[in-house]
Image (cartoon, grey):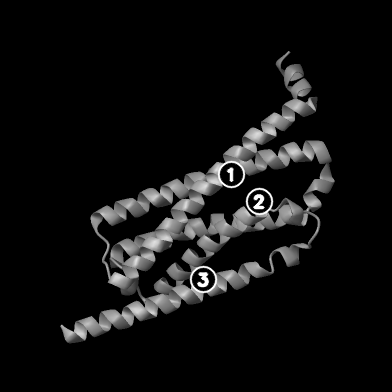
Amino acid sequence: MTINTIMSLLENKECMEFVRLGVIYTHLVACCVAIGLVLTSDIAMVKDLSKGKVFTVHDNAHMESLQQTVIVALIALWVTGAAVVGIDYLDKGMDYFMNPKLQAKVIIVVLLTYNGILLHRLVLPALQKAGSLLNLGFSARMLALFCGSLSAVSWMYAAMLGVGRPLAWKYSLAELLMAYPVLIALGFLTMLALTERAKQQDYSVRLSG
């Protein structure tokens, strides 16, 4: 009886449209939460760089809480995204997976997931130990800057693809992702320039002191 009920609901297009709407709404909320947290964190990091601020216990706790929240948002993004794909597959069949926009979103979310693992296991512990981005070794600092740039750009790019319905089937996968590595490189170079400037200021303060 239960299986028959589920099957009848799946075959009911009007019902599935409401289910899809609810899933997409949850999907967008998760994305918005993550983007808001990532942007506020990046802005705070830039401010701390300009002031030469060292991490406190409160800052470390905040970073851990922030990372956990982003991980939860990323999991919600995967679950709701998979649900939307499943619903659309039932409606459109295998051809749906040939959509370049869908492929681009999957690639970016996979990169976000891998990047989140690096941030959680390598970058955050290194920052907590060093006390400041400026105190990190060269390799660790470059990794932190790259992961931060990748995270910010990827969340914004994924959101753009998510709301860009006119992009579906109109452009190839290569065209959709053309600006993606360029924006990551620009973000990385910008953060690198800010970090070098902050290091020079910190060095000047120490000399004058």
Q: Residue 202 in the image: state x and y as whole percent.
A: 27, 79
- Residue ID for mark 3: 187
Q: Quadrant of residue 125?
A: bottom left
Residue 189 position (above or below residue 31): below
Q: Residue 165 in the image: state x and y as whole percent.
A: 73, 51
- Residue ID for mark 2: 162
Q: Are marks 1 and 3 in contact (CB under 8 Å)?
A: no
Between 110 and 172, the residue placed more toward the observer is 172
For the residues marked 2 and 3, what is the alpha-carbon distance in whole angstroms?
Answer: 21 Å
**Mark 1 belongs to which amino acid?**
Leu
Image quadrant in which the N terminus is located: top right
Which numbered circle lies on residue 28? 1
Q: Sequence-wise, which precedes: disc 1 or disc 3? A: 1
Residue 25 position (above or below residue 169): above
Q: Residue at x 46, y 58 (%)?
A: 39
Q: Residue 73 in the image: state x and y as whole percent.
A: 51, 45
Q: Are marks 2 and 1 in contact (CB under 8 Å)?
A: yes
Secondary structure beneath disc 2? helix
Instruction: Please rate how many residues cluster around mark 1, counting C-alpha atoms within 10 Å: few if below 14, some from 14 to 19, many from 20.
Output: some
Q: Residue at x 82, y 41 (%)?
A: 92
Which numbered circle lies on residue 60? none
**Mark 2 belongs to which amino acid?**
Gly
Between 137 and 105, the residue placed more toward the observer is 105
